[in-house]
């Protein structure tokens, strides 16, 4: 765990503890900045924003953009996504698709893979193969996905779900074009007929 990630965890714990006895965010922010130093003022403000404000797929993607995959997502980001019915989708290593937030799941996709989301007993489940809705295809080195510097982005996604994209790096190199979507945009009543060659 990087030093910054550890500081983020300490600030999150401080905010959680302070919030259990005080509901004045301005005072909590002031005390957190006193404790951790003014160098972390923006980080304190960001973490409090995640904890209290409404986020859309677009605003969440904006916050995650240019993140290094080794830094991952902090606890408040995952909780914020869950609270706002948002799902963050990104790659991990060279063989995993990860879902965080309102859906927590992962799928094996060495060299890419096709998935869809189905609702079972009120919960969204990630399943392999394409259906007739809620599809997400993980693309490994898709040649059409490039940076402004013409470098191929290893992980990218195609989906029929309305979404916003964000960009991640790995040690400064292109790694993933992730997506964020609102769970309310998933189609609940579609009948899934899985087909390996179905296109959308």
Image (tube, rainbow, N blue to C red):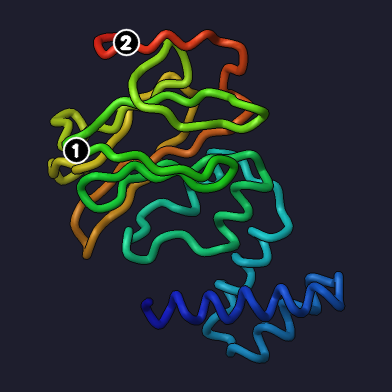
Does 119 appear above or below 42? above
Image point (71%, 73%), residue name: 16
Mark 1 is surrounded, within 10 Å at the Cα level, by few (under 14), some (14 to 19) or many (20 or more) other residues, namely some
Q: Which residue is mark 1?
A: 146
Say whether residue 44 is left or right of residue 54: left
Where residue 110 sits: x, y (%)? 19, 39
In front here: 83 or 150?
Answer: 83
Say whether residue 125 is left or right of residue 34: left
Identify the mark nearer the N-term, 2 or 1: 1
Query: Spatial distance from mark 2 to mark 1, Cα to Cα?
Result: 29 Å
Image point (82%, 74%), residue name: 20
Image point (61%, 66%), residue name: 47
Image point (48%, 48%), residue name: 62
Where residue 182 sits: x, y (%)? 58, 33
Where residue 146 sits: x, y (%)? 19, 38
- Secondary structure at badge 1 equals loop
Mark 2 is surrounded, within 10 Å at the Cα level, by few (under 14), some (14 to 19) or many (20 or more) other residues, namely few
Does 110 appear above or below 158? below
- Secondary structure at badge 2 equals loop
Q: Which residue is mark 2?
A: 195
Where residue 36 sits: x, y (%)? 59, 88
Q: Quadrant of the C terminus?
A: top left
């Amino acid at each position: 765990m990087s030093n910054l990630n550890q500081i983020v965890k300490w600030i999150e714990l401080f905010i959680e503890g302070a919030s259990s006895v005080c509901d004045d965010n301005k005072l909590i922010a002031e005390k957190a900045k006193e404790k951790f130093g003014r160098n972390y003022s923006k980080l304190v403000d960001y973490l409090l924003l995640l904890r209290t404000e409404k986020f859309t797929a677009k605003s969440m993607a904006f916050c995650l953009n240019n993140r290094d995959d080794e830094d991952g997502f902090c606890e408040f980001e995952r909780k914020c996504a869950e609270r706002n019915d948002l799902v963050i989708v990104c790659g991990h290593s060279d063989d995993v698709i990860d879902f965080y937030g309102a859906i927590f799941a992962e799928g094996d996709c060495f060299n890419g893979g096709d998935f869809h989301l189905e609702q079972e007993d009120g919960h969204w489940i990630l399943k392999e193969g394409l259906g007739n809705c809620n599809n997400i295809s993980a693309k490994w080195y898709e040649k059409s996905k490039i940076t402004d510097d013409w470098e191929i982005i290893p992980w990218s996604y195609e989906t029929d779900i309305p979404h916003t994209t964000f960009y991640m790096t790995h040690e400064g190199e292109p790694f993933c074009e992730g997506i964020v979507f609102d769970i309310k945009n998933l189609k609940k009543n579609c009948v899934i007929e899985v087909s390996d060659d179905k296109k959308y």
